[in-house]
C-alpha cells in the first residue's frame, strides 16, 4: 500500500486560479458567511472549507483505508518490536543531522516517546528540548525534571514572559493559516525565534488519538455527537438554530470515510476534522519543519488493527511505551501520575496533591496554578492581564465595525465576562481571533 497521509501537515489551498500555500498571504480573499458561522459555533472550520469564499484546503489522502489481511495476529506479543521498528524507520527516513533536533516536552506520554526514539540517533546533550506554559503545572514542571535528568539542552518559555499583542497574534494567524483561535499558538512565535526556521521540530502530535485516548464509541448520529462535543463552552449560536447548525456542519465536515473502516464513525469524523483542521493548524506552522512519527502510516495501522479491548483507555499503547522507555517513565505523567512508572507507590500521594491543588485553584485562581493547566488561564487573563485585556478590547472594537457578527450580543458577552456573571472565554477568544485573521488577510 502507498504511504497514506492522515493529516495535512503541509497544507495546500486551491481556488479558481490554482494551488497555493500560506492562505493568508493570498490576494483577493472574501469571507464565506457559512464558514464564519461554523467558526463562531465550534471554534474552527472543518472539512475542506476555509473562512474564505472559493478557497478550499486540499484533501491529500483520498479513499478508505482497508487493513485487509495484514491484521496483526497477536499484537500483544508483536507490539514492542513492531512498533519501535516502524517508528525508528520513520525517524531514520526524516532526520537531518545537519539541523538542530528540537523536541517540545509536556507532562504527557507522547512527547517523551518521541524523545526516547530520537535518543536512538542523537546524544541527549545534542537534543534541544523546551517546555512552555504555566509554572506550577504538570506540563511545565515535569518536562523540566526530565530534561535535567537526561541532560538535554533545555529552554523554558514561561507564560509569564509571553507578551500578547495584535502584531504577534497576526503572525500566529499567518503561520497557522488562520483556521482556529490564535491566542494559544502565539507562544510558538517565541519558539521559532529562538531555534530558527531551519531546525527540525519533532512532535508527539495525535499519539493520544492513535492510542485511543479519545473514545466516542458508536453513535446513531455521529455528526450530531461531534457537533455537540465541539460546541462545548461556546454560546454565540446556542439558541434556536441547532438543526440548521447540524446541517451546515454535515455539509462542511468530511464524512469519516478516510478512517471509517478502522474506527467508529464518530471517532473517524473527529480525526478528520477536529484533529486535522484544529489541532494540526496549531502545530504544523508554515515557519516550522515539523515531523510527527506517531501518525506515520505503519504505526497508525498497527494500533488500528488491534482489538478494541486493547485500545480502550490506551491500555496497549501506554504499557508498550512505558516499558520501552523506563528511564523516561520514571517520572509521572499528566494524565496517569505514577501508574506507568516504577514508582507506583507514589501514586496515592500524587493524587492527593492533585486534588488539593485543584481545589485551591478553584477558590484562588490568581494565586494557584491548576496542575493540568496547559496555557495561561484565559478566563482570568481576559479580565486581569493587561496585555490580553488590551488585545481583546482592541480586536473586539475593530470587529464591531464590520458587518460580520451581532455586535450588541458580542459586547454583552464581554460585559458579562468582565463583571464575572458568566464565563464567555471561548466566545471572546473566537471573536478576537476572527478579527486577527481578517487583519492578517488584509480585509
Image (cartoon, helix red, strand yellow):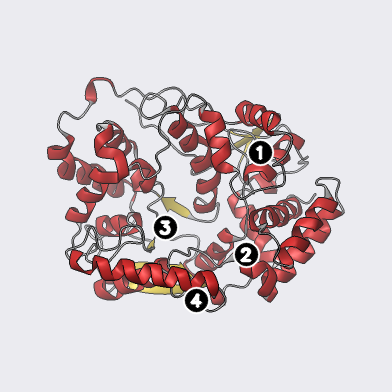
For disc 1, the neighbor class at 10 Å (few under 14, some 14 to 19, many from 20) is many
Which tag, 4 or 1, sits closer to the chain's start? 1
Taking the view exactly as shown, the residue that stands out farthest to the top is 68
Q: CA distance from mark 1 to mark 3?
A: 26 Å
Which-is-in-front pick, marks 4 and 1? 4
Front position among marks 3 and 2 = 2
Image marks 2 and 4: residues in contact by CB distance under 8 Å: no
Question: Residue at the location (44% across, 34% down)?
Answer: 267
Find residue 339 and name its label. none
For marks 2 and 4 on the same chain, the one whose residue lies earlier in the sequence: 4
Residues 178 and 316: in front is 316
Q: Nearer the viewer, mark 1 or mark 2?
A: 2
The label on residue 50 is 1
Which quadrant holds residue 327?
bottom left
Q: Is residue 18 visible?
A: no
Q: Say whether disc 1 or disc 2 marks the residue closer to the N-terminus.
A: 1
Q: Quadrant of residue 57?
A: top right
x and y percentages locating residue 15 in the rendered image: 68, 32
Residue underneath mark 2: 379
Instruction: Estimate the spatial distance between the alpha carbons at disc 2 and disc 4, rounded to whole Å.
Output: 14 Å
Task: Give the CA separation, mark 3 to mark 4.
Answer: 32 Å
In the current view of this chain or complex, which residue is farthest to the left?
77
- Would you say the residues marked 1 and 2 are in contact, meaning their CB atoms lie under 8 Å apart? no
Disc 3 marks which residue?
A: 201
Tell which of 110 and 17 is nearer to you: 110
**Left-right relation of 165 to 74:** right
Amino acid at each position: 500500500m502507498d504511504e497514506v497521509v492522515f493529516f495535512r501537515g503541509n497544507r495546500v489551498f486551491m481556488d479558481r486560479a490554482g494551488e497555493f500555500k500560506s492562505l493568508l498571504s493570498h490576494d483577493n480573499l472574501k469571507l464565506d458567511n457559512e464558514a464564519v458561522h461554523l467558526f463562531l459555533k465550534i471554534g474552527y472550520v472543518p472539512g475542506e472549507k476555509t473562512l474564505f469564499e472559493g478557497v478550499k484546503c486540499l484533501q491529500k489522502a483520498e479513499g478508505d483505508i482497508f487493513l485487509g489481511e495484514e491484521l496483526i495476529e497477536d499484537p500483544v506479543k508483536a507490539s514492542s518490536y513492531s512498533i519501535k521498528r516502524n517508528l525508528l524507520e520513520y525517524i531514520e527516513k526524516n532526520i537531518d543531522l545537519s539541523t538542530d533536533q528540537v523536541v517540545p516536552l509536556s507532562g504527557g506520554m507522547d512527547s517523551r516517546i518521541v524523545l526516547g526514539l530520537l535518543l536512538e540517533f542523537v546524544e541527549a546533550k545534542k537534543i534541544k528540548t523546551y517546555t512552555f506554559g504555566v509554572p506550577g503545572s504538570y506540563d511545565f514542571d515535569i518536562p523540566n525534571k526530565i530534561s535535567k535528568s537526561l541532560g538535554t539542552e533545555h529552554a523554558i518559555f514561561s507564560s509569564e514572559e509571553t507578551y500578547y499583542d495584535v502584531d504577534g497574534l497576526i503572525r500566529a494567524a499567518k503561520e497557522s493559516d488562520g483556521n482556529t483561535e490564535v491566542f494559544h499558538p502565539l507562544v510558538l512565535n517565541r519558539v521559532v525565534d529562538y531555534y530558527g526556521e531551519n531546525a527540525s521540530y519533532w512532535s508527539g502530535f495525535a499519539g493520544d488519538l492513535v492510542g485511543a485516548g479519545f473514545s466516542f464509541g458508536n453513535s446513531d448520529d455521529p455528526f450530531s455527537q461531534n457537533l455537540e462535543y465541539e460546541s462545548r463552552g461556546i454560546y454565540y449560536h446556542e439558541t434556536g438554530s441547532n438543526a440548521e447548525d447540524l446541517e451546515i456542519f454535515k455539509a462542511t465536515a468530511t464524512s469519516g470515510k478516510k478512517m471509517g473502516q478502522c474506527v467508529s464513525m464518530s471517532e473517524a469524523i473527529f480525526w478528520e476534522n477536529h484533529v486535522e483542521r484544529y489541532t494540526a493548524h496549531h502545530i504544523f506552522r508554515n515557519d516550522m519543519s515539523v515531523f510527527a512519527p506517531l501518525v506515520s502510516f505503519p504505526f497508525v495501522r498497527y494500533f488500528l488493527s488491534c482489538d478494541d479491548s486493547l485500545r480502550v483507555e490506551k491500555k496497549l499503547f501506554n504499557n508498550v511505551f512505558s516499558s520501552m522507555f523506563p528511564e523516561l517513565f520514571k517520572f509521572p505523567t499528566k494524565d496517569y501520575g505514577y501508574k506507568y512508572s516504577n514508582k507506583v507507590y507514589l501514586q496515592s500521594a500524587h493524587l492527593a496533591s492533585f486534588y488539593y491543588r485543584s481545589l485551591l485553584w478553584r477558590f484562588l485562581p490568581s494565586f494557584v496554578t491548576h496542575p493540568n493547566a496547559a496555557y495561561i488561564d484565559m478566563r482570568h487573563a481576559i479580565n486581569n492581564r493587561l496585555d490580553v485585556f488590551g488585545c481583546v478590547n482592541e480586536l473586539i472594537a475593530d470587529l464591531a465595525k464590520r458587518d460580520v457578527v451581532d455586535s450588541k450580543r458580542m459586547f454583552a458577552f464581554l460585559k458579562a465576562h468582565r463583571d464575572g456573571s458568566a464565563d464567555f472565554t471561548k466566545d471572546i477568544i473566537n471573536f478576537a481571533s476572527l478579527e486577527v485573521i481578517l487583519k492578517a488577510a488584509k480585509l
